[in-house]
Image (cartoon, rainbow, N blue to C red):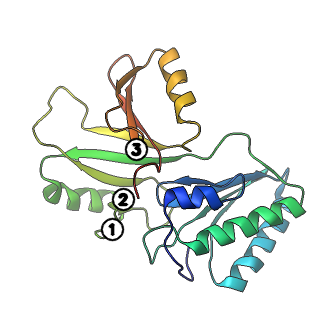
Amino acid sequence: MTGSTGTPVSGAQATEALSEPWRVLADTVYAAYKTGGMVKGGEFVAKIIDAAEAVQHHPDIDLRYGSVHLALTTHSAKTLTEADVALANAIAGIAADLDLEPLPAPPARFDLAIDALDIAAIRPFWLAVLGYRDEPDNPHIDLTDPAGILPGVWFQQMDEPRPQRSRMHVDLWVPHDVVDERIAAAVDAGGTLVTDEFAPEWWVLADVEGNEICLCTWQNRD
């Protein structure tokens, strides 16, 4: 997203103020709508562009054959702002006018977490090999894809070597109101809840071979 800035808002404030189906994941709000085809999707996107240009605040838009996926954040502020919430609600109104329904599945976001003893030593390698952009002042992510398509990367400080444990894991950001259901489903599918020590910021789960994933929400991060 590019454009104007506004007063920063917390995840809780944004969640309270957002219209359905917009959800907070990390420092971004997301929504996706069913369009049934490219023509209807193009009409929706055109109206979004008009609304965005009017306030000089612009979302990331992914137009697919039967859906439109949207993301809003204020990069200059490195956080959510009132401008994001206002435009998200305006887009929800446009979707309602066009009789568009949200996709049934809630939005989600993947980040790659890399555990390290010496983050400064490995950071240049991952920056170079991925061709990513460094984000030294971003509290939510360390490296980002310049095209804004591939998952972000962040480094987690280790306090001691862990040779018997995977040094990489996936962070899956999910809406706060679906995380309990997702954990229960993962456990029913043979997984293990490794720890809820950091809940409700994140929960660590693992499959039967010990491969880990963190389910993350915006809660307690403000």
Depth check, front residue: 201 or 75: 201
* Residue 81 as seen in the image, left or right of residue 56: left
Crowding at dot 3, Cα within 10 Å, few <14 / some 14-19 / many 20+, comes out as some
**Residue 183 drawn above or below residue 139:** above
Of circles 3 and 1, which is in front? Answer: 3
Residue at the spot x=68%, y=65% of the render? 88
Q: Which numbered dot is residue 83?
A: none
The answer to whether any part of residue 57 appears in the image is yes
Measured from the top left, where is residue 99 in percent x and y?
A: 90, 56
Q: Nearer the viewer, residue 132 or 209?
A: 209
Residue 141 is tagged as 2
Marks 3 and 1 sit apart, C-alpha to C-alpha, by 21 Å
Q: Residues within 10 Å of mark 1 (few under 14, many from 20)?
A: some
> Measuring 35% from the left and 54% from the top, which residue is drawn there?
153
Q: Which residue is mark 1?
A: 135
At x 13%, y 57%, the residue is 121
- Describe residue 2's horizontal placement relative to residue 34 as left or right: left
Name the amino acid type tagged 1: Glu
- For label 3, the residue is 201
Quarter holding the C terminus is bottom left
From this view, report whether residue 40 is shown above or below residue 58: above
Q: Amino acid at mark 3?
A: Glu
- Where residue 211 appears, as percent x and y from the top left, is 34, 27
Q: Secondary structure at mark 1?
A: loop
Of the residues tagged 3 and 2, which is closer to the observer?
A: 3
Residue 149 visible (yes or no): no
Q: Mark 1 touching mark 2, by CB under 8 A? A: yes
